[in-house]
Image (spheres, rainbow, N blue to C red):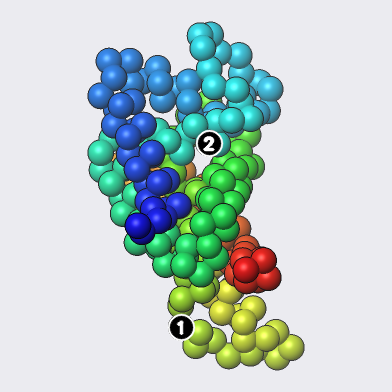
Amino acid sequence: MRKVSATTVIVAVTVAVSLIANFAPNVAQIQYAAGFIPARVSGGLLLPGPLVPVWATPLSSALVHGGLAHLGMNMLMLAFTGQETERAIGAKGMVTLYLIGAYVGCAAQWLAGPMSTAPMIGASGASSAVVGAYSLLYGRQRAKAVGPIPAQLVHIAWLAAAWIGINLLMGFAFLQGGIDVAIWAHIGGFLIGLALARPMLLWRWRHA
């Protein structure tokens, strides 16, 4: 019997929880209670009602999305890059990378606006970490060394610069339409994915 991949489990659980939340009559309250709110971390915001503990909101926020389009985009990106990344770093590595990506993405969003009271929801930070690892593990390296800087570091720098540029442009475009996108979570997640791709690969095969 074929073993179910960690990527499939993450996608299935996220889709199930998001659909339940999106079709609940109190969807706005759920998003606020489960979302990552930077001001809660900074200690400058007291909210009434039941809330997910602030330390757990990077995880709970990844399970709740702002509509079907938001959910579909994140899960398609995760499903495509996650299966291949998991083949390289294994199921444990995949889960570890995803969880770290969720926390680093929220940390980046907090650094960008520590007193923001807007709840951040969605798996963008965690998924971006997987995309970052996938880009490094499977992308064709065409960069050349620049002086004392080796080609591998130049390649990583180009990947980081491209992702940051794309997300800054995307964030600006969406903002013109009145939609606030957590671009710093995308950027933070991607950068930690780049940083952890090789260590995760070595960790997996060292313990094989």
Look at the numbered disc 1 and give the secondary structure of its residue.
loop
CA–CA distance between discs 1 and 2? 32 Å
Residue at the spot x=27%, y=15% of the render?
25
Residue 114 image position (x, y, % from top left): 63, 34
Local SS, label 2:
helix
x 48%, y 26%: residue: 34
The residue carrying pointer 2 sits among few (fewer than 14), some (14 to 19) or many (20 or more) residues within 10 Å by Cα, namely: many
In which quadrant will I find the N terminus?
Answer: bottom left
Closer to us: 182 or 26: 26
Between residue 78 and residue 116, name the one nearer to us.
Answer: 78
Q: Is the C-beta separation of discs 1 and 2 under 8 Å?
A: no
- The spot of residue 70 in percent (x, y) is 31, 42
Earlier-in-chain disc, 1 versus 2: 2
**Image mark for residue 72:** none
Identify the image quadrant of the C terminus: bottom right
Left or right of residue 145, residue 60 in this image: left
Tell which of 144 and 3 is nearer to you: 3
Residue 202 placed where, x, y %? Answer: 65, 71
- Furthest residue to the right? 148
Q: Can you identify the residue that label 1 sits on?
A: 140
In screen coordinates, is 149 left or right of 191? right
Residue 80, image quadrant? bottom left
At a point 25% along the width and 38% down the height, the residue shown is 68
For disc 2, the marked residue is 59
Looking at this view, is 183 or 191 the one in front? Answer: 191
Crowd class of label 1 (few under 14; some 14 to 19; many from 20; radius 10 Å): few
Q: Amino acid at mark 1?
A: Arg
Q: For residue 170, say whether it is visible.
A: no
- Count how many numbered circles sit on residues in the image: 2
User: Is label 1 or label 2 in front?
Assistant: 2
Amino acid on which the number 2 mark rests in the picture: Leu
